[in-house]
Structures are given as structure tokens and as C-alpha cells.
Amino acid sequence: MATAALACSPTRRRGFARAPGHASGTPLRLTITGAGLRLLARADGARAAVLRTTCAVPAWRPWILRLVDVRRRAPWQGLACVAVTAALALRFPFISLWLGAAILGIPHLISGVRHLAVRRRLAWTTWAPIAGAMLIGAIQLLTDSLWTTTATSLLFAAAMASEALSGRSARRDRRLALLGVAAIYGTAAVLWPLRSLIVLSHAHAVGSMACLALIARRRAPLAWVPMAAAAGVMVAAFAGAFDAWLPAAPYAPPSSADSLATARILAAFPGASELTRQRGLFAYAFGQALHYSIWVRLVPDVDRPAAVPQTFRVAWSRLRADLGRWALPLAAACAVAPFVILLGGTTARETYFTLAYFHIGLEAAALVGLIRGL
């Protein structure tokens, strides 16, 4: 929606960056890249035509032009994401979880690594526990044991502590507070592994909201507004504000029903009432959907040089600049993953979540680094 402003503006050619030169590499890579660039060029042309038509409506033009600047665009874009994800999670929580992981799972994982570990630098001591979490994820494919969950949580706590201690400019009291959070989480993971996992599952979404607010604090200072609205939605859900719309038996796709049943376990603590579990399921599905939208759409929009919207070709060129030769195979993975996860059922979903679980620790450690650097 925001890109429409440039199609209306007489200075839009200055607003849009231009894609850099041709790709280099093997003939197969050049062929695939060339075909992709032609497809992106057609998509840019189609979008420009739609936006010109939209901007021709006098009542819409002034409002669309206001969205050129990311400072105005980010809050409205974030509120739209909150509204859409909340509505879908409220009525169809399992569908939201099913489609979210399949369509946006790999893209959000790549975006999180890109914006937290490529454009920003984690301490080298942070990568050791993150790599350990990756290794445990691979082990979990072969064995299902409680020790792997506890060990991964301890590695996450170590990564958070590493980021709290790294750097030179942070105040001592802030470092100690962040170290305390890491210590509390690590201790809870040992003493109450299931309960700490449930808390982490909900806190994961809150952490991505905090990352967005911190990354955008200079470029889009009001980016915290939709995140405050999201927090309000979660509080209202547990307070019973949406009880009348909660489905008693939400539909779950049969092929992934076993995997989606895990969401009920992560929705609330053991022994909770059925109503509390329904509320928790909504909060969990809403948080997951919003988490995906934050990393796929909101963070990339505020964490780039230009304040104006960009074309698909420029977005691709910047992705290549950040990821290098990994950009093309990762883009292919994003295209293939939805079919694999949707058609692969429970096995494919569980494999994805097991291998991608490390990114929770990476995001937690990066969030500690962002807070430490304030």
C-alpha cells in the first residue's frame, strides 16, 4: 500500500533506487537470475499501473502521498498487520499457524538472521551457543528427549549473557540487569522446563515487537504504537474481551493435526481451564502471525537506507548485497518451502520447527544487544 505514494508523486523517479548491474556466476545461475529479474520487472510494472489507477482517485491521493515517508507509513502499516493477524487468529487459530509457518516461516527466518546478525554484529562468543543450539536441533531429528529442550534453553541463556557482557559503552547497571534476566531464564529452564517453554513461546512474539521498536527508534519513532496495540490485544484476550468469538473446536487441517496439537500445549500452563486454553491459543496464534509479519514486512521497511518505498528489483539487489551468493538458493528455498510444509504434513512442520528453533535464541541475544546499546 505504501508504495502507491511514489506512483502518485512527480518526484517518484528520485524516490525509487535503481537495481545495480547484472549478476555474475555460473551460466545456470545467470539464467535463473535473469529470469527472476525479468519477472520482478514485470511485477514492478504491474504494480506501478495499479498504483497510478489508484492515485487517480482524488479522495485517495492525499492519503496515499502521506505514506511515502516511513515515519508516517510504519505506524499505519503495523496497525494493519495487527488487525489482520488478530482477526485471523481469533476465528481460525490453527489455519493461521498452519499457513504462517508454511508460507512465511523460511522468509522470516532469513530476515531475522539478515537484520540481526548480518547488518548488525553479534559478539563472537554469542555464536558458540547459537551454533550449539543448531547442533542440538539436528540431534532432535534423531531422538526426542527432554534434555535437548533444557540444553537448548541453557545455550540461549548463555547467548543472552554473552551479548550483555560484550561491547564497551553500556552502563554497568544495565549489563547486570540483562545478566539477571539471562540467569533467571536459564534457572527456570532447568527447574520448570515445560513452563519455561510455554513462557518462551509467548515471549518470543513480544521479543520481536521489541526488536522492531528498537531498530526503528530513529527512522520511525512511532513504530512502537502498533506494538503497544498488539500488547493491548493480548491483555484483552486473557481478560476475556474476545470470549464470545473464540471457537470451541477450531478447524485443524488433518495432515498437520498432530503437529498443530502442540499449540494447545503451548497455549497455557498445565491444569489451566479450557477457557484459559482457548484464550491462550488465540494469544499464541496471534503472536506467531504478528511475529512473521514483523520480520517479513515491518523490520525490512524500517531497516534500510531510503525512507521511501522500493521496487521489487531494488529489494532483491539489496538482499544480494547482504547475503551474497546465498541470496539465490535462499530465495529458492522460500519458493519451495510452502509446498513442502503444506504437503509434508506433521513430519515437514516438525522438521522445520526443530531446525529453526535456534533462531529464538538468536533473536533473544540480539534483543539483549540492542537494549545494551541504548
Image (cartoon, helix red, strand yellow):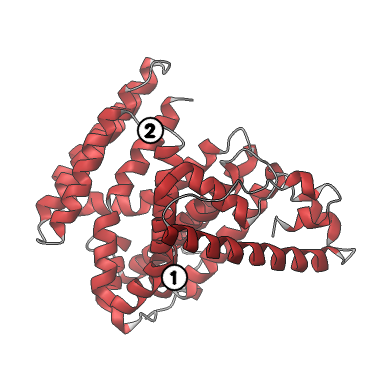
Please count the marks in the image.
2
Which quadrant, please, contains the N terminus?
A: bottom right
Which residue is drawn at the image coordinates 44% and 62% (left, top)? Answer: 104
Q: Is residue 238 above or below residue 166?
A: below
* Disc 2: which residue: 368
Element type where label 1 sits in the image: helix
Element type where label 2 sits in the image: helix
Near mark 1 (Cα within 10 A), the count class, few <14, some 14-19 or many ≥20, is many
Amino acid type, callout 1: Ser
* Disc 1: which residue: 96
Near mark 2 (Cα within 10 A), the count class, few <14, some 14-19 or many ≥20, is many
Which one is nearer the viewer's eye here, 12 or 369? 12
Which one is nearer the viewer's eye here, 229 or 39? 39
- Can residue 238 be seen? no
Q: Position of residue 297 (x, y in %)?
A: 55, 54
Q: Position of residue 54 (x, y in %)?
A: 80, 67
Q: Is residue 111 above or below residue 211?
A: below
Amino acid type, callout 2: Val
Which residue is drawn at the image coordinates 19% and 42% (left, top)? Answer: 132
Q: Position of residue 129 (x, y in %)?
A: 22, 37
**Label of residue 18 in the image:** none
Which one is nearer the viewer's eye here, 129 or 176? 129
Which residue is drawn at the image coordinates 15% and 58% (left, top)? Answer: 140
